[in-house]
Structures are given as C-alpha cells and as structure tokens.
Image (spheres, rainbow, N blue to C red):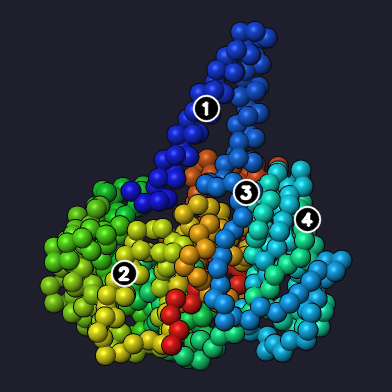
Amino acid sequence: MSSKQQLLKRHRRNKRVALLIGLLVLVAAGVLVVWWLPLILAVVLWVAHEAWFADHLFYSPGDDYQYAFPADNEQPGVRLDAGRVLLDTPLTLAGDETLILGIELKSSWLGRFLDPAVQVLGCGTPDWQVFERGVAGRRFLNLTGTAQALAAGKLLLRGRFCRIKGQPTLWLFRQPDYRQQRVMVIAPHADDAELAAFSLYSQAAESWVVTLTAGEIEAEHYQQMGLSRGEAARLKGRLRAWDSVVVPRWAGVPESRCVQLGYFCMQLSAMQAAPHQPIASREAQLDDTRLFRQFNSLVLPGDANGAPTWSNLIADLRALLLKARPQVVVLPTPLLDPHLDHICAHAALLEALQDLEWQPTTLLGYANHLHDNDRWPMGDSGNGVALPPRFDASPELVPCSLQLSLSQQQDKAMALGMMHDLQPRAPFKRRVRRLLQQLLAGRGPSPYGENEFFRKAVRRHELLWVLKQD
C-alpha cells in the first residue's frame, strides 16, 4: 500500500469515528432538548464540514516545511522592513532566476476559516500565494519573476489572514535556459505533460512528448452512453491516446514527436515486478498495446508483438531516447509524487538510461500529485506556486521555477481543455461542496474549467526540480 493510500485510510477511519461521535451528540440533543434540534444541527454541521473541513490535509498546519538546498547555491542576505524585502548588498539578476524566500507565517483567527495568503506586490500584476488554514510555521514563497523589483528594493509582502514573523531567508538558483535545448517530457498519462511542463515544452528548441499509458480505466462517464465496461475503457483509452499525440500540436510540437506507448493504466508496477510477463488492462479486456498506439508515426520495438511487458516498455524508451537525443528529460519525481504510475515512470526512464550511449545532461522532476495535500498548489488559477509541503529535509532538492505570462497561462488552459479526461462534470456532491466553499470560505472558481486541475495547474509558475545536472 502506498504512503498516500495509508494516509487516506487513516483519514477515513478518523472521519468515521468523528461521524459516530457526532451522531451520538445529535441523538442526545434530540432526547434531552427537543426532537427537531438534531435535524438543524446535522445540516449546520454538514455545511461546516463541506465549507471548512473537507480538504485532504494529512499533517498539522502548524508543522514547519523542511527543505535542504545545496550549500553551494547563492543565499543573498535579505531583511523585511515594513513588509518590503530589501537586499543587504546589491545583486546582479538577469530576471529568470529561481528565487525562493523562506518565511515564518502565523494565521489570524479568520485564517482558520478563510485561506491565509501572502500578497506579493511591486512587480506588475500582484500575486497571491496561498497556504493552509490555521498555518503556523515555516513556508517557502516562490518569488521567481520578481528579480527586477527585488533588486530595486520595491518588492513588498503583505499577509492576508496571516502575518509574517521574524526575518526571511532568500535562496537564489541560477540555471541554464532549458528552452534553448532539446526537451523530452515523460508523461505517465495523457495530460501529465501539459499539467507539469506545458510552458517548457511549448517554448523549447525541440520537444518530444512520450506518454506511457492510455489511461483507459475509470471510464464510467462513457458507460453512460450504453457501453459495457470493457467497451467504455477501450473508447476512453483511444480518446486519451489521441489526446496525447494531438494536443501538443497546439503548442507547436508536431505529431511525429509525440508518442503514445499504450501500456495500461495502474499496471506499470505489476509489469515492473514481472518484467517479461504481459500484464493485461484492468478494465479494457485487452492484453495488446497496439490498439492505443495506432496514432503513432514511429515504429517502436513494442509494436512487434504488442505485449504489455516491462521489458517492452524499457526497449521503447531506449529507442526513443536514441532517436530524440534529448538534452533535458522531464519526468515525475517519487520524492514528492506518490502516484504508482508516476513512480514507475521515473524508474522506467532511469532503467532505460542505464548503459545507453546517449545521456541527457539534465533531469527535471515534477509532481502532479502529493502524498499529504490534495489541494496543492493552493489558491486560485493565475496565482504563484509556493513550494509544496515537505517534512523530510533529506535528500537535498533544487527547485527550478519557470514563468508563464497570462497568454501562456491561457494557452495552457486551452490545452488542458482539449483533454477528454478533464471535460466531464464533477460529481454532484463535489459541485455542492465547491459552491459552499465559494459562498462561505471565499474560494473562487477557475475561469478556465470545472476540473480541479484548471485551478491547480494554470498558474504563473511551473515548478520543476533539478534531479541531475551535468
């Protein structure tokens, strides 16, 4: 069982205990006070839960985030003076450096019901970086894109429903312009590349998008059309295979450099455990990957027999690496992302690189899911992306933050909107929850779409992590 599954199991157990206690209190109120009081209390408690306590947050908001950055990275001296971030000594900045500011936050009482945030002013459009309700501890702001205001002493921070305590710490990361290099994005599923790295792959000198699985499971939406479970899964897989090959064209990447490998969703770990054994789809009644490879323009080793095996996956990746010869490979990092397919995608890429004659100079990691906070990045579409919760300072991590203009954010939103998996409406209960949160907790909807990933991913930053740099 993954760490996230364990956390969910514990969360649901605690929720059942709380529900039982609540029921006992309601029954007691009905017996001791008046019969209709439990009905009113039940509605009030349910509304309060949906508005303020429904987030999957598997840690205390009072816990300090823990990051260790390499000692050789620059750490300019800074101080806060009436909210203004001032450098101790002048600093030469090009404007594209990754800037991370460590701060101590303390929530106000309102910040236990409305999302606390730090407003970043002085660099054009104000930015809001949002944190957990009741926050009380060390957090890390992403100031990438504010270099000019910082150097000029015009960068201003203001807390909303929270205050900044003490003095901050600044880290400066100077990195090559990866947009000038050949980039390959490894996506476990269609839309992972767009969620994590649309800005990078849309601007790179040459980009490849390689999607490992068809993402065919959980096709209930298509069963509503009268299809059987297997038929619905095959239709969904074909649609997502099409998306993975065609949608990057919106960003200027030709179909000839977009590849769908057609392996089966949530089966990569089983393939890895038995590398030469074919592992069939859970729902599509398929044990041949070629149905989902039909849109590829390249012939790959796995096409010979269509067997869904780990050995075929590694052979496919090796062939693609030798053909594309990417200087930068972008892939999920298991240091932050607990999704099993994402963990296996990382492992498969590393295995494919072993003893290969071509080696990329840079590996960049991404996290589209977190172990302990389903809402991160917190806040609304267009906000900045603060560093995610992390409670183990080992190993050291190097952030790489890319900026997105408003037009680039809009293009990214449109790319996500073309993805079939993000188009169906949310379940009714989730829509009601969001409405209550908008009315009572001050959370706004995304202007781009209903799916939660429009809020999470369409931001002024894309946050990656340097896993290898030669």
Which residue is pictured at 40% across the width and 45% down the height?
Answer: 6
First in sequence: mark 4 vs mark 1: 1
First in sequence: mark 1 vs mark 2: 1
Q: Which is more foreground, mark 1 or mark 2?
A: 2
The disc placed on residue 19 is: 1
Q: In this rendering, would 265 be left or right of 161?
A: left
Badge 4: how crowded within 10 Å, few (<14), some, or many (20+)? some
The residue at the far top in this view is 32
First in sequence: mark 2 vs mark 4: 4
Does the residue at mark 2 contact the one at mark 3 (Cβ under 8 Å)? Answer: no
Q: Foreground: 48 or 100?
A: 100
Q: Which residue is mark 2?
A: 347
Q: In this rendering, would 5 be left or right of 55?
A: left
Q: Secondary structure at mark 3?
A: loop
Distance Cα–Cα, label 4 vs label 1: 34 Å
Which residue is pictured at 31% across the width and 75% down the height?
Answer: 350
Residue 218, compared with residue 334, is above or below; it is above
Residue 39 % position (x, y): 62, 19
Residue 192, compared with residue 390, is above or below; it is below
The residue at the far right in this view is 82
Distance Cα–Cα, label 2 vs label 3: 32 Å
Q: Secondary structure at mark 1?
A: helix
First in sequence: mark 2 vs mark 3: 3
Q: Which is more foreground, mark 1 or mark 3?
A: 3
Badge 1: how crowded within 10 Å, few (<14), some, or many (20+)? few
**Residue type indicated by callout 3:** Pro
First in sequence: mark 1 vs mark 3: 1
Q: Which residue is mark 3?
A: 61
Q: Which is more foreground, mark 4 or mark 1?
A: 4
Does the residue at mark 4 contact the one at mark 1 (Cβ under 8 Å)? Answer: no
